[in-house]
């Protein structure tokens, strides 16, 4: 039988140190589609990665280097089957801001400083792995992920409109880019627009007419051939230009300790961006394909990728939402796709850099535009709007932040919104009074004075852990219920089925509540107390104050104890 998941023994013995987790379990039937997707990814990423060098300020060939050893390193040490690690506009921009004051842009010294930033970022990622900080990705909700990817799709789609139309756009701000394109529409270059439209048509049409043919690869190859034959560059169509070939030389960057210390803040900013963006992207695709995400293993893979970037003479790499979307769109489903991309890039570096100079830049823009459209999760937004309007607004806010504030600020806002959404649920949890009908079924009804489980006994259910932010709500509702009557409330029982712990502030509030209720001759009791909550009660010295005789494991034993003393 062909198992689709590793056995428990394998996972237990090798899961921590095993390699190539993004390829396993290996599916032979997916080998050809993964290889074709890797070729397609290379066709798109080769010119795109070289475009990112303009942002980073490094030589064009270093963009190709980001698709070689860093990609292999992540495939070896990472775990995600989809995440593409390569050059990224956000980290490239951060890099340029930090390094440009220290050396001439494009110079050997500049490149050495750029490489040391990648090495420092790798060290930060490794430290995060050792401290097991991958859990931070768990705070990103599905709602925010939908908004984030939609925002990235909108931002990237707008960013390439100028290239597709032959309009010069100098700004990096999305709103300004869109306004520039709209105001300069009369100046659009019709041949460039025709090529862009043709590329989009090829990419969208091949899945229907020839499903096994990679549309982007066909578009890139055809565009290079036509450009060389018809001299696109001589007719006003922007082309890539000459690219220096050859494999990278391995070695550590030659910089001083003073320069290393100066670049630590830049590396730290890149580290935050890498963790945030890679975690968001990896989590989004793991969720979409119902796969388990190992956040800490991803940190190790990212550290290895950036270390490989540093020693191969290129700049910092990051998990890319657009390129990961390209893998999915092209039919890739494992790191076989990424290794294929690295192999293609190695061949291109050795023998095929010459033809790249004919590639029209609008072809790249058109390909990225199609990918961007696929990132916009219209279906997910529709479901949110129908099922949860509040979460729909949260997703739209995240989308707007990414579009208008940038990916880096959008990611930070997405993290903040996810945390606030989590806090909101804990701050105002569901509460209820537990009633029992004549058939001995339990019912949860809204909190209101006068509702009693038994005459003189009110059972109050609280739907979250107790901590400083919700302790006031708990005590206010508890006092409200204890003051109800007639008949006089003798026991206020807290149903602790949803409570697994409490902090010092909540414990202090509970102690005061118990003292106040005791003055009113009302017993504070707890039922359905689990082991974790009982440990916190003991540690906070609440067990002694409440009395072990008033702490129960089940509702029935609690009610039986009450009835036995009040017959």
Image (cartoon, rainbow, N blue to C red):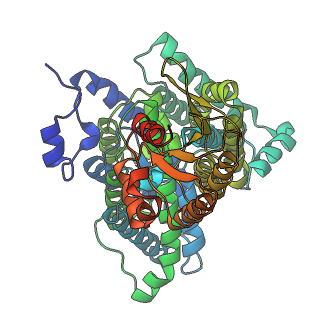
Outermost residue toward the bottom in this view: 258
Q: Name the one closer to the observer, 432 or 127.
A: 432
Q: Is residue 469 left or right of residue 219?
A: right
| Residue 376 screen position, x and y as percent | 62, 33
Outermost residue toward the top in this view: 209
Residue at image location 46% in from the left, 70% down from the top: 114
| Residue 128 screen position, x and y as percent | 38, 64
Vertically, is 252 above or below 169? below
Which quarter of the rendering shows the N terminus?
top left
Q: Is residue 69 left or right of residue 61?
A: left
| Residue 66 screen position, x and y as percent | 40, 54
Q: Is residue 491 visible?
A: yes
Q: Is residue 92 visible?
A: no
Residue at image location 65% in from the left, 29% down from the top: 384
- Residue 90, quarter of the rendered image: bottom right
| Residue 89 screen position, x and y as percent | 56, 54
Q: Name the one closer to the observer, 52 or 525.
A: 525
């Amino acid at each position: 039988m062909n198992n689709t998941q590793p056995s428990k023994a394998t996972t237990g013995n090798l899961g921590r140190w095993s390699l190539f987790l993004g390829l396993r379990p290996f599916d032979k039937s997916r080998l050809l589609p993964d290889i074709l997707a890797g070729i397609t990814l290379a066709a798109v990423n080769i010119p795109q990665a070289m475009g990112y060098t303009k942002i980073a300020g490094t030589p064009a060939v270093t963009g190709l280097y980001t698709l070689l050893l860093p990609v292999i390193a992540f495939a070896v040490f990472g775990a995600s089957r989809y995440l593409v690690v390569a050059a990224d506009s956000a980290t490239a921009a951060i890099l340029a801001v930090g390094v440009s004051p220290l050396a001439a842009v494009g110079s050997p010294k500049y490149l050495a400083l750029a490489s040391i930033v990648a090495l420092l970022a790798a060290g930060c990622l490794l430290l995060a792995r050792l401290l097991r900080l991958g859990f931070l990705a768990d705070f990103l909700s599905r709602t925010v992920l939908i908004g984030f990817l939609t925002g990235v799709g909108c931002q990237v789609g707008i960013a390439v409109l100028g290239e597709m139309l032959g309009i010069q756009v100098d700004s990096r701000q999305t709103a300004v880019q869109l306004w520039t394109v709209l105001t300069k529409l009369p100046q659009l270059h019709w041949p460039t627009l025709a090529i862009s439209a043709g590329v989009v048509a090829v990419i969208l049409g091949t899945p229907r007419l020839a499903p096994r043919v990679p549309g982007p690869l066909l578009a890139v190859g055809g565009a290079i051939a036509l450009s060389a034959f018809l001299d696109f560059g001589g007719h006003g169509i922007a082309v890539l230009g000459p690219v220096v070939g050859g494999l990278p030389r391995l070695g550590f960057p030659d910089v001083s300790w003073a320069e290393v210390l100066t670049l630590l803040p830049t590396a730290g900013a890149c580290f935050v961006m890498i963790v945030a963006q890679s975690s968001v992207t990896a989590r989004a695709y793991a969720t979409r394909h119902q796969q388990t995400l190992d956040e800490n293993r991803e940190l190790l893979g990212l550290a290895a990728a950036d270390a490989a970037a540093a020693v191969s003479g290129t700049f910092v790499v990051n998990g890319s939402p657009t390129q990961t979307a390209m893998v999915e769109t092209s039919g890739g489903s494992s790191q076989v796709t990424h290794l294929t991309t690295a192999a293609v890039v190695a061949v291109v570096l050795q023998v095929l850099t010459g033809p790249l100079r004919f590639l029209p830049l609008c072809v790249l823009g058109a390909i990225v535009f199609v990918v961007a459209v696929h990132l916009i999760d219209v279906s997910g937004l529709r479901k949110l709007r129908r099922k949860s309007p509040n979460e729909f607004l949260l997703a739209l806010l995240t989308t707007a932040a990414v579009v208008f504030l940038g990916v880096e600020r959008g990611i930070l806002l997405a993290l903040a919104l996810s945390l606030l959404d989590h806090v909101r649920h804990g701050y105002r949890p569901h509460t209820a009074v537990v009633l029992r009908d004549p058939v001995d079924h339990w019912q949860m009804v809204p909190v209101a004075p006068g509702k009693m489980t038994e005459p003189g006994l009110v059972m109050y259910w609280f739907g979250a852990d107790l901590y400083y932010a919700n302790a006031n709500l708990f005590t206010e509702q508890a006092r409200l219920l204890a003051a109800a009557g007639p008949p006089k409330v003798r026991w206020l029982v807290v149903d602790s089925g949803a409570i697994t712990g409490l902090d010092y502030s909540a414990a202090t509030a509970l102690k005061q509540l118990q003292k106040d209720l005791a003055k009113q001759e009302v017993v504070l009791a707890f039922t359905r107390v689990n082991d974790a909550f009982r440990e916190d009660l003991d540690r906070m010295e609440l067990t002694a104050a409440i009395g072990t005789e008033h702490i129960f494991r089940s509702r029935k034993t609690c009610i039986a104890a009450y009835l036995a003393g009040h017959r």
